[in-house]
Structure formats: structure tokens, C-alpha cells
């Protein structure tokens, strides 16, 4: 690496350089590539001169140790981001197997937000100002802060990978990106009375066995659509949640549960009775259609044996809610109702977390903190009565 290097202010347009300013600091370093071509690297956005000097020294040390190749940073973000995603999703190239829906989400973030706004920026020149400008643009387009956070998570993963592969010397600038706070979704599931009203209408529907299992077992929509009879033990009163069925990119995709782990959930006697009746109805439909019946092995199917798509399940649920005249809620809120009923019945935090398939108990505790407080208060009152 050449000795030609230094730090200076990166003055903004219109800045008065003679009266002092708050413009960020930058460092520059000249080096020669393996082909003996002279190149210069500039890094800007440092709040103080000391930070710029330290970053320059770290860059020089990493270069001498062979940890980075500054020439890679000449790629634009439009060139780099698709390459990152391809490697990220390829387990044979150092990546890991990603869910199809996850890959689709990354592709959407790249296509709609990151490439249009950052595509012309070279990887080596990416700064916190570029990133924050992208998020301001998204907000101006009416995008939610939740979406901004999701896009930020995608970009952060891409930048981290760039550092690991030597495209960038550091991802410290991402720590300076300021994000607005996101208000967490507050679940407001039905009360037992509202569920009773809905149940009176839903029991007449073909979707009733699925909806009852959604509340009893707390299963996700994709898990219900992917449930197979081979995973159901009616004699043991339990189901094994091992598959999901989603609709991604115009096609049905089957995979593992969201947490990546298989789990067993025990059922109430009432649910077992409904599932037995449903299996009998399904067998009668199979006999009636004969060779025209699709034997998919799935628990929940239409009259011809074809599995349900998650979107059609939500649409059917919305129609039943409207017909029942109860307060509108999302299909996913049936999981929240399942948690409410479980906590009220005395299930521990670990039992509820395991039944819902959360990746950690902390997620369950955050989601149902208020309910847990009520349950703990009730338990304290019982202890007081015993004492």
C-alpha cells in the first residue's frame, strides 16, 4: 500500500470552509492492485478526525493482512446485492437453506427499495447518509416503519456479508443509521363470548375442523394447510407439526415450520371428536369421486382432495366472521386466542411457547406480558387463600 494517505473534511455543498463547520471527516488511501494498477479508496461519514484516523489505520492493517481487497468495492450496489442474495441462499456456496418466503421477501426488498435508491452507489462508498436517505424516501412513499425496519434488516445482512468477503473494511456506519421506533402490534383476540358466537356459525362450515384445531393447537395457517394424516394420532390425541404449505411466487411450496423445529401438540377430546368425524367425511368423498379424487394425504382439503391454499383459508375465515357478526380480526389472531385460553387454563409460559412453536420463550413473554401478569396475579390470590 502506498504511503499516500490522510484525513480531511468532506465538505457539503455550500459549506463555508473558513468559519469551521460540522461536516463529516473522511480518509483516503492510495494502493496498487495485484495488477500494479494505482487506485484510491475514500471513506467518508466519520463524526470526528480521530474516528477517521482510526478507520484509516484499521483499513491499512486489514489490507496488509490480506483481509480485504479494495478492488471489490468498485462494484455497484445494483451488481453486488443480487450476487449477495444468490450466495446467501446457496448452502453449497457457504450460505444456508432459506425458506422460499424469506428469499421472496429479500428479492422484493432489493427490487422495490434498495436497488432503485442505492443501485448506482459503489459498495465501497456506501454511507449512513445513503441508507437514511433511502428510508426517508420510503416514508415519503407512505411505507410503514415496520417495512423500513425489515428492509434495514435485509441491508444490514448484505453489508455484514460484504465485510466478511472483503468488499468493505467495516460496517460501523450502519450503527449510525437512525430508525424510528416501531409500535409493536398489540394482540386483541376475541373474548370467550365472541368465540362462542363465531363458533355457532362456523360449525356449519367445511372449514370448522381447521378453525377449531387452529385455536386448540395454536397452529399457524401454513402449518394447518400442510398438516398430513400421517402426522395425526387421534388415539393419542396429538398432532405432530412438521410441515407447512405456503404460496410463493405463484406456486405452492412445502417446507418446515417457521421455527425450523418439529413439535407435538396434545388435543382436547372435543377436537379429537371433530377430527374423527372430518376424516370419515373425507373418506366418503374419496369413495364417491373414485379416480377423480386427489389423494394428497393432507388433513384439510376440498371435496376433490386438493389441499387448501393459505389465502383461501383466510378468505373463508373473513366470510364467516362477517356472517357471524362478530368483531373483525385476523386469522393469525386465532393463535393469540389459543394463547389466551392456555394461560387462563393454567398453562405455564414454557408450555404455551412450546405449543405455539415460538423460537424462544422470550418471544412468548413479550407477546403476552399483560396476560401473564393477570395469570400471576390470580395465582397469588390463590396462594393467599391457601395461606
Image (cartoon, rainbow, N blue to C red):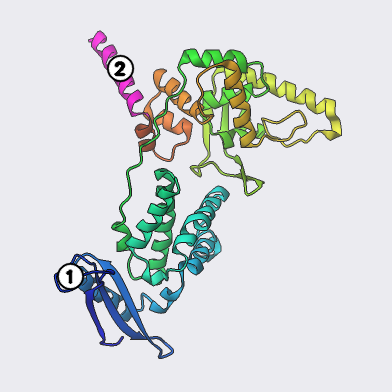
Q: Which residue is mark 2?
A: 379
The residue located at (18%, 71%) in the rendering is 49
Q: Quadrant of the N terminus?
A: bottom left
**Looking at the picture, how far across and down is residue 316, in whole percent?**
63, 27
User: What's drawn in magenta, residue-wise?
Assistant: 368-387
Does 200 sit above or below residue 77? above
Q: CA distance from mark 1 to mark 2?
A: 57 Å
* Residue 385 counted in the magenta span: yes
User: In terms of secondary structure, where does tag 1 sit?
Assistant: helix
**Looking at the picture, how far across and down is residue 236, in whole percent?**
58, 24
Q: Nearer the viewer, mark 1 or mark 2?
A: 1
Is residue 198 something one can see in this rendering?
A: yes
Q: Earlier in the sequence, mark 1 or mark 2?
A: 1
Q: Which residue is mark 1?
A: 50
User: In terms of secondary structure, where does tag 2 sit?
Assistant: helix
Using a 10 Å C-alpha cutoff, classify the residue at mark 2 as few (fewer than 14 neighbours), some (14 to 19) or many (20 or more): few
Using a 10 Å C-alpha cutoff, classify the residue at mark 1 as few (fewer than 14 neighbours), some (14 to 19) or many (20 or more): few
Does 159 sit above or below residue 304? below
Q: Nearer the viewer, residue 97 or 327?
A: 327
Amino acid at each position: 500500500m502506498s504511503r499516500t494517505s490522510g484525513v480531511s473534511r468532506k465538505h457539503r455543498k455550500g459549506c463555508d470552509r473558513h468559519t469551521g463547520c460540522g461536516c463529516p471527516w473522511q480518509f483516503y488511501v492510495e494502493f496498487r492492485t495485484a495488477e500494479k494498477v494505482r487506485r484510491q479508496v475514500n471513506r467518508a461519514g466519520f463524526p470526528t478526525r480521530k474516528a477517521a484516523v482510526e478507520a484509516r489505520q484499521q483499513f491499512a492493517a486489514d489490507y496488509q493482512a490480506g483481509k480485504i481487497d479494495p478492488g471489490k468495492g468498485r462494484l455497484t450496489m445494483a451488481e453486488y446485492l443480487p450476487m449477495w442474495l444468490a450466495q446467501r441462499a446457496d448452502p453449497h456456496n457457504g450460505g444456508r437453506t432459506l425458506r422460499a418466503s424469506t428469499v421472496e421477501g429479500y428479492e422484493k426488498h432489493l427490487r422495490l427499495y434498495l436497488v432503485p435508491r442505492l443501485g448506482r452507489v459503489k459498495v465501497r462508498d456506501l454511507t449512513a447518509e445513503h441508507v437514511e436517505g433511502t428510508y426517508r424516501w420510503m416514508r415519503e412513499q407512505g411505507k410503514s416503519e415496520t417495512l423500513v425496519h425489515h428492509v434495514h434488516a435485509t441491508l444490514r445482512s448484505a453489508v455484514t456479508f460484504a465485510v466478511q468477503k472483503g468488499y468493505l473494511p467495516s460496517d460501523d456506519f450502519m450503527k449510525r443509521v437512525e430508525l424510528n421506533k416501531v409500535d409493536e402490534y398489540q394482540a386483541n383476540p376475541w373474548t370467550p363470548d365472541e368465540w362462542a358466537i363465531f363458533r355457532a356459525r362456523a360449525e356449519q362450515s367445511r372449514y370448522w375442523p381447521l378453525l377449531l384445531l387452529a385455536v386448540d393447537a395454536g397452529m399457524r395457517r401454513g402449518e394447518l394447510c400442510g398438516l398430513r394424516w400421517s402426522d395425526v394420532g387421534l388415539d393419542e390425541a396429538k398432532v405432530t407439526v412438521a410441515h407447512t404449505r405456503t404460496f410463493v411466487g405463484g406456486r405452492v411450496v412445502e417446507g418446515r415450520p417457521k421455527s425450523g423445529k418439529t413439535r407435538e401438540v396434545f388435543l382436547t377430546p372435543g377436537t379429537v371428536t371433530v377430527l374423527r368425524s372430518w376424516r370419515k367425511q373425507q373418506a366418503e368423498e374419496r369413495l364417491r369421486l373414485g379416480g377423480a379424487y386427489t389423494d394428497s394425504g393432507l388433513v384439510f382439503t376440498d371435496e376433490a382432495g386438493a389441499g387448501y391454499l393459505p389465502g383461501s383459508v383466510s378468505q373463508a375465515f373473513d366470510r364467516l366472521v362477517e356472517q357471524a357478526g362478530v368483531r373483525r380480526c385476523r386469522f393469525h389472531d386465532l393463535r393469540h386466542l389459543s394463547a389466551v385460553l392456555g394461560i387462563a387454563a393454567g398453562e405455564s409460559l414454557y408450555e404455551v411457547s412450546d405449543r405455539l412453536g415460538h423460537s424462544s420463550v422470550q418471544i412468548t413473554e413479550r407477546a403476552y406480558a399483560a396476560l401473564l401478569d393477570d395469570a400471576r396475579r390470580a395465582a397469588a390470590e390463590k396462594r393467599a387463600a391457601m395461606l
